[in-house]
């Protein structure tokens, strides 16, 4: 049974540090990405060092790996969730401006653009 996902929202007003709130939003996105990349890089480095020290595989093996369709699908799903987390600040703003927008409406818009 899959655990339901709960959207997290901070309470209170968002602090702004720059004259243009868009700059603050962009900075928040960049910092969220920087945090994600930092953690992933440390974990990958640990995995590679452990694998190489135990003779399991090397960095070159990782570079040469071609993932099967199932793995690509899992990665695509993870990427969508990741981007949703990173772009959450933009989504919250859009919800405030146009609360009638729904995930379904978003998907329809993306599909429409994709078909163009």
Image (cartoon, rainbow, N blue to C red):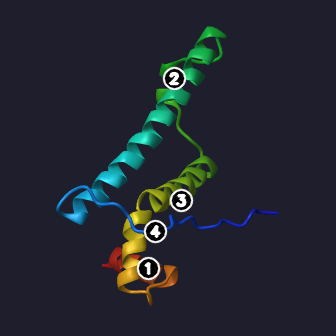
Percent coordinates x, y for residue 13 in the rendering: 40, 68
Q: CA distance from mark 4 to mark 3?
A: 25 Å
**Residue under numbered circle 4:** 12
Going from N to C along the chain, the mark reached first, 2 or 4, is: 4
Going from N to C along the chain, the mark reached first, 4 or 3, is: 4
Going from N to C along the chain, the mark reached first, 1 or 2, is: 2
- Asked if marks 3 and 2 touch (Cβ < 8 Å), the reply is no
- Asked if marks 2 and 4 touch (Cβ < 8 Å), the reply is no
Going from N to C along the chain, the mark reached first, 3 or 2, is: 2
Going from N to C along the chain, the mark reached first, 3 or 1, is: 3
Q: CA distance from mark 1 to mark 4?
A: 26 Å
**Viewer-nearest of labels 2 and 4?**
4
Element type where label 1 sits in the image = helix
Q: Quadrant of residue 6?
A: bottom right
Q: Quadrant of the N terminus?
A: bottom right
Q: Nearer the viewer, residue 14 or 52?
A: 14
**Residue under numbered circle 2:** 45
Q: Quadrant of the C terminus?
A: bottom left
- Asked if marks 1 and 4 touch (Cβ < 8 Å), the reply is no
Q: Nearer the viewer, residue 45 or 24?
A: 24
């Amino acid at each position: 049974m899959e655990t339901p996902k709960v959207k997290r929202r901070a309470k209170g007003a968002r602090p702004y540090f720059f004259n243009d709130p868009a700059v603050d939003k962009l900075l928040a996105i960049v910092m969220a990405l920087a945090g994600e990349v930092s953690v992933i890089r440390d974990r990958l480095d640990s995995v590679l060092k452990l694998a190489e020290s135990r003779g399991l595989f090397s960095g070159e093996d990782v570079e040469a790996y071609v993932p099967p369709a199932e793995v690509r699908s899992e990665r695509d799903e993870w990427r969508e969730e990741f981007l949703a987390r990173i772009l959450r600040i933009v989504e919250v703003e859009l919800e405030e401006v146009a609360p009638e927008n729904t995930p379904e409406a978003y998907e329809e818009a993306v599909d429409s653009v994709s078909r163009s």
